[in-house]
Image (cartoon, helix red, strand yellow):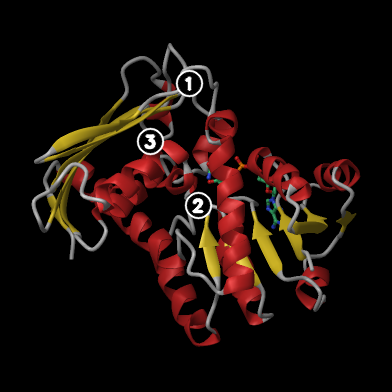
Amino acid sequence: MKINVALFGLGRIGMMHAKNIYRHPRFKLKYVYDINKRASVNASKKFNAKNINNPSFAFKDKKIHVIFIASSTATHVPFIEKSVKYKKVVFCEKPLDLNINKVVSCKKKIKNLRPKIQIGFNRRYDPGHFSLKKSLLKGKIGKLEKIIITSRDPAPPSFNYLKNSGGIFRDMTIHDFDLVRYYLGKDKIKEIFATASNVSNKKFSKINDYELATCILKSKAGVISIINNSRHCSFGYDQRVEIFGNKGMLISENKRKYNFFIDRYKSAYKLQLNDLFYLVKKNKKSRASFDDGEKALFLANAAYKSLRSKKTVKIK
Ligand SMILES: NC(=O)c1ccc[n+]([C@@H]2O[C@H](COP(=O)([O-])OP(=O)(O)OC[C@H]3O[C@@H](n4cnc5c(N)ncnc54)[C@H](O)[C@@H]3O)[C@@H](O)[C@H]2O)c1
């Protein structure tokens, strides 16, 4: 039997998810919902799903197994709470919210309802980035000592998007904070130093945001991670990871032929969907959980604290 999905949000990433769900042999895209009715109707026609005018319709339908949240960030927490209440499995795009207090309060509310939630940290599913994790676990580079992540977007999103994005650390670096945590495994981050600036595009300063950022994190075991971000890149989307250990070094190379995240992480988004299948059908813990979403946001907040104070911030 196929897994029935109701997809909320049909913008940039929602349309991509709609296509992947529609094409996946184990899922059925049953409902689509967006406050922008045109977007929703368009998706319903394209992917043979029913357009609904009210999300309650999906929550109340017992045949819906998954609520797939790809709507704007501010909608994530309320949709998660409602989905869990109605015993739905949840996929939710990152970030969980821009306000950590809302995330903590959501966690408390849903805790006793045994939620099954997967977060859209797609980098964890990228075959290249994931192969580093596998090699690390097999001991191929010995003891992990350094993680170096470069993540540069080809061009910034619209300033309308940026204004409500929560800033570079919560919107963009959040993926890299999560990836660092993924490679660290049981080891935990104990401190962070963050810096950011605007050199070429001063419009960022007007919205109190940054086009360039670098974070240095140190773990309890002493692993140093360097995250290198830019909102623009003259030679295209630049996504690379290097892990260095006492017995070697491995790189997940940049893939220059891809323009942006939808192409570059195409396989990752598909593998992410397979993970959702295992979460629904086999009760297998998702590779990226609600807790991972919370912890990455916590690090983003600590990065802002460091940026403002110009000091290294301890992570409790
Ligand atoms: N994992 C990734 O690689 C990745 C990439 C891009 C965006 N995202 C995340 O996905 C989310 C959406 O980003 P986007 O770039 O697609 O934004 P977008 O603005 O293109 O699309 C958001 C859509 O949500 C709809 N929406 C807003 N409120 C709604 C509500 N209450 N109910 C239903 N629909 C509603 C909007 O009308 C819009 O169509 C954001 O949280 C973003 O951070 C993740």
Secondary element under disc 1, as helix, strand or loop, is loop
Please name the residue that numbered disc 2 is placed on.
94
Q: Amino acid at mark 2?
A: Lys
Looking at the picture, how far across and down is residue 200, in whole percent?
36, 14
Q: Mark 1 vs mark 2: which is more N-terminal? A: 2
Q: Quadrant of residue 249?
A: top left
Left or right? Give the position of 58 relative to 81.
right
When the figure is inspected, residue 58 is found, relative to residue 185, above or below; the finding is below
When the figure is inspected, residue 126 is found, relative to residue 25, above or below; the finding is above
The residue sitting at 61% across, 77% down in the picture is: 84
Mark 1–mark 2 CB contact (< 8 Å) = no
Within 10 Å of disc 3 (Cα), the crowding (few <14, some 14-19, many 20+) is few
Q: Amino acid at mark 3?
A: Asn
Q: Mark 1 vs mark 3: which is more N-terminal? A: 1
Left or right? Give the position of 69 relative to 201.
right
Please name the residue that numbered disc 1 is placed on.
154
Looking at the picture, how far across and down is residue 125, in whole percent?
48, 47
Instruction: Tell me the distance, in whole angstroms, between the alpha carbons under discs 3 and 2.
Output: 21 Å
Question: Which quadrant of the figure contains the C terminus?
Answer: bottom left
Q: Amino acid at mark 1?
A: Pro
Q: Quadrant of residue 224?
A: top left
Left or right? Give the position of 187 relative to 55.
left
Looking at the picture, how far across and down is residue 123, in whole percent?
44, 43
Residue 79 or residue 131, whichever sits in front: 131
All told, the count of numbered labels is 3
